[in-house]
Image: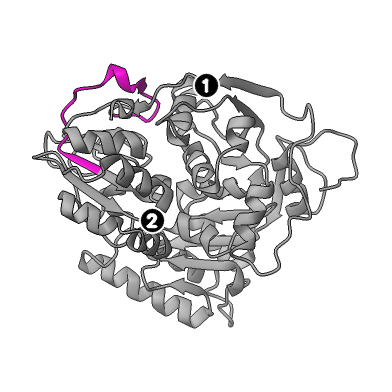
Amino acid sequence: MSTNTDQAMTISEKIFSKASGKTVKAGEFVMANIDMAMTHDITGPLAVEGFYEIMREKEQKKVWDPSKIVILFDHQVPADSLNAAANHIMLRKFAKEQGIMNYDVYEGVCHQVMPEKGHVRPGDLVVGSDSHTCAYGALGAFSTGIGSTDMAAVFASGKLWFRVPETIRFEVNGKLPKHVYSKDVILHLIGDVGAEGARYKAAEYAGSTVQDMPMSERMTVSNMAIEMGGKAGIIEADKVTEKYLQERIPDFKLDTYWKSDKNATSEIREYDVSKLEPQVACPHNVDNVKPVTEVEGIKVDQVFVGSCTNGRFEDIEIVAKMMGDEPVAKGVRLLIIPASRTEYMKVLRAGYIEQFMEAGAMVESPCCGPCMGGSFGLLGDGEIGLATSNRNFKGREGSPQSFVYLSSPATAAASALTGEITDPRKI
C-alpha cells in the first residue's frame, strides 16, 4: 500500500490508514470502516439485542451492510440445551430478516470457516465477537476480537473506534526439527513474552520459519496471538497466501503486498528454532510453557485433537500417521474433531476416520467441542486432559478441579498411544 508520507509504517498502520481514510500511526485513535464482521451462537444473541436497542427509534432497523456480516453456529452444535436451541432460533430469524449469510448447517468452527469460505482478504480490517478472531491475521488482515456490544455498534454503523496498536515483530528463523511444528513455535513465543507481553499490540510474525509454513500452520500461530495479550497476529501476505485464496475466491490476485516498511517496528524479538523441543503449556496458564521432556510421564485421561487452533486436515493427518495401526492406550479417551465440514471430508476421504474409530478414538462432527467447556467431552474432577486447543485456564474444559495441558498434534498423538504425556520424537 502506498501512503502520502515518507514515515516508515507497519502493516497495522497501513491497514488502519486505509480503513480510516487518512494516514495514521500507532497510538492514534481512529474511527475505522469495517470490511467484515463475524459473530457466533454464543456471542451473537447479545449483539443482536444491542443492535435492536441502538435502532429502536429508527423506522428501518437494518444492518449497515448484510454482505459484510457472517453468522456461524459452532460453540454449542447441535444445540446441547434449551438455551442453546433458543439462541439458534433467534439468530436464524435475525439472519433471514436481515439477509445475512448464516452458516446454519453446522459448517464448522468460525475461525476455520471464515478464511476457508473466502470471507477474509489481505489488508482487510475484520472484527469478530470472539477473542480468537486474530486467527485471520494469517492471511495478512488486521483481525481482532471485540465484545458483543461493540458488535452491535458495527451491525448498525459499519464503523468502530480503535487505538492503532504498536507492533512487536517476531523474527523466527531456522528449520524446525522433526516432530516440531508451528504449535510448538507459538507456545515457545508465548512462554517467552508472557500472557501480557504483547498487551494491546499487534504481534507480527516473520522470518524464514514462518515464511516456510503452509497456511494451516500459519493459522495456528496467528490464532494464539491473544494468548500473549495481542490485539492481532499478522503474517505478511505472500505467494502462500495468494495460492490459498485463489482456491477460494474466483480471480483473486495479490496486487497489494501488505508488509511493514523497514525500521517501522520499534520492538523486534529474534528466535532461532532449529533446536526447539516440542512444547507443552501446563495448567493453568497458557504462558506456563515447558519443553515436553520436563513433563513427560504425566498420565492423561483424555486427549482432544481439534479446535480452531489445530483442527485442520494437516493436523489430523499428523495424528493418523503417528498412530498408524496402533490402538489408543487403555483408559484414555481420544476425541478427534475436524474444524470444518470441508476438513472433515478430507479426513474422511483419506480413510483416517475409519483408522481412528478402529483404534478406539471418537470422531465428532465439526464444532468447538470441549474447547470452551460448553459442549461434550468435558473433564471431570481430578481428570487430566491434553489438548491441541488454545486455552488451559481452570475449568476451561470442564470441572474447575481438572487439569488441561496444551500441545501440538504430534505430542497429542504420542500421548494418546502411551496414556501419558510423551515426547513425539520417541514414537
Residue range corresponding to the magenta coloring: 283-303
**In the rendered structure, which amino acid carries the disc numbered 2?**
Ala
For image coordinates 66% across by 70% down, the residue present is: 250
Q: Residue 6, how many percent across, how many down?
A: 90, 35
Helix, strand or loop status at disc 1: loop
**In the rendered structure, which amino acid carries the disc numbered 1?**
Ser
The nearer-to-camera label among 1 and 2 is 1
Residue 188 relative to residue 296: left or right: right
Residue 203 relative to residue 104: left or right: right
How is the protein colored in the picture?
Answer: one colour
Residue 221 drawn above or below residue 67: above
Read off the residue under disc 1.
Answer: 274
Check disc 2: other Cα within 10 Å, few if <14, some if 14-19, many if 20+: many
> Does residue 301 show up magenta in the picture?
yes
Q: CA distance from mark 1 to mark 2?
A: 29 Å
Location of residue 376 by image quarter: bottom left
Q: Which mark is residue 163?
A: none
Q: Residue 388, how many percent across, how many down?
A: 34, 41
Residue reaching furthest left? 331
Q: Residue 54, how many percent across, how many down?
A: 54, 67
Please tell me which residue lies in front, 416 or 17.
416
* Residue 393 in view: no
Residue 27 drawn above or below residue 172: below
Which SS does the magenta portion mostly show?
A: loop
Location of residue 48 by image quarter: bottom left
For image coordinates 55% across by 45% down, the residue present is: 214
Numbered circles on residues, count: 2
Read off the residue under disc 2.
Answer: 339
